[in-house]
Image (tube, helix red, strand yellow):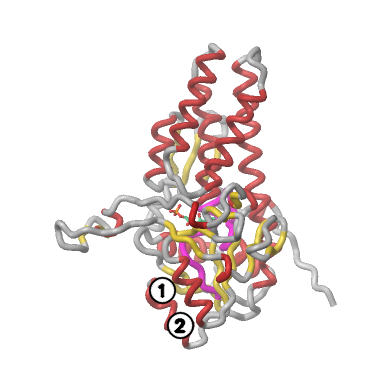
Amino acid sequence: MTQTHPQIPLSEVGLRPVVLREDGRALRLLDQRALPSQELWLEFTEVEPIARAIETLVVRGAPAIGCTAALGLAVCSLGFPEEPGAFRQACAVALERFANTRPTAVNLFVAISQMREVLAQAPTSTPVPRLREQLKTTAVRHVEDDLAACLAMGANGASLMPEGGTILTHCNTGALATAGWGTALGVIRTAHRWGRGIDVLVDETRPVLQGARLTAWELQQANIPARVITDSMAGALMAQGKVAAAIVGADRIAKNGDVANKIGTYTVAVLCAHHNIPFYVAAPWTTIDLSLESGREIPIEERDHNEVHMHGGTRLTPEGMAACNPAFDVTPANLIRAIITERGVHVPGELV
Ligand code: MRU
């Protein structure tokens, strides 16, 4: 007997962390640095503060960064010169600044090229108000497409979540990391809504603690049973048979199915392989970068070493100590059971 499952209606999507202010004249971001202790919304109208918001993780998560750049340009363009040449030049400078914020997540570059395309396609005679309208339409479409992709991913992946099982996840891949609902966490949320009786183990995800702070907060809000663990606990829990599956998001997926995601993802994938636990990746199709043959070509962001040295304003390491802080790692395709996108469930090596 085939079981049918309800679609998640838009009215039930809940949190959307990257939005336009009602009058369309400012970008609103939920400040993810302040969570979970404070729900603080910030408003932006200018290029440099938006670029800094991406760099300092006010907004983070591959799709959410793309949405920020797209809506950000639409909003900033309201303050750009009325003369068409100068307007186009200001757009180009803004997009270049956004492109230099974070190198790993490809969704940012997808959003930027969609915005560049609007300007490239519009005849030089196009009046500035018309260009602004077209930029806004494209940006809003980018965001709505991401939300629709998240909901479809959830529906495509939910039945892969073992019934009654404990699902391990890493980093934050929820509404906060996207236009809404989430990728890997969206699959978990959909599985929960479908009554699969799952519970979640959340890797804290050092150094920035996206798991402990953000995923834990989202799961709590959604009333999904969950426990936070330190990153070092995953292996022991797997060895004890306490993990049924793992699911993570992605910042960039190469043509051969190698996946760049938050640092620590590779460790989880190796542990899953050792314990014969299915390891899934959920990401929108825009995360797949067919121009890269393998994960070796994915640029990996090195972030400020103080993220490792410091915690909550306290120094953890001796003064003068060196550190490493690669923000992402690459999981080879052979460790991934399936990649879930809005288009379906894919074998990692067969994306084209
Ligand atoms: O450094 P971050 O917090 O932007 O890294 C985010 C991740 O690695 C996520 O897992 C990834 O972007 C997928 S989010 C849907």
Q: Residue at x 70, y 57 (%)?
A: 152
- Image side of residue 326 versus residue 125, left or right: left
Q: Is residue 159 above or below residue 63?
A: below
Residue topped by disc 2: 237
Q: Is residue 68 above or below residue 87?
A: below
Magenta stretch in the rendered image: 167-185
- Marks 1,2: beta carbons within 8 A: yes
- Image side of residue 78 versus residue 213, left or right: right
Using the rendered view, name the quadrant where residue 142 is placed: top right
Residue topped by disc 1: 229
Q: Nearer the viewer, mark 1 or mark 2?
A: 2
Q: Does the stretch in magenta take in 336?
A: no
**Who is closer to the viewer here, 34 or 166?**
166
Q: Secondary structure at mark 2?
A: helix
Using the rendered view, name the quadrant where residue 118 is placed: top right
Q: Is residue 262 above or below residue 62?
A: below
Q: Earlier in the sequence, mark 1 or mark 2?
A: 1
Q: Secondary structure at mark 1?
A: strand
Q: Position of residue 130 (x, y in %)?
A: 65, 19
User: What amino acid type is highlighted by mark number 2?
Assistant: Leu
**Who is closer to the viewer here, 128 or 25?**
128
Using a 10 Å C-alpha cutoff, classify the residue at mark 2 as few (fewer than 14 neighbours), some (14 to 19) or many (20 or more): few
Q: Quadrant of the C terminus?
A: bottom right
Rounded to the nearest whole Å, what is the CA distance between mark 1 and mark 2?
Answer: 10 Å
User: What amino acid type is highlighted by mark number 1?
Assistant: Ile
Q: Position of residue 217 (x, y in %)?
A: 46, 62
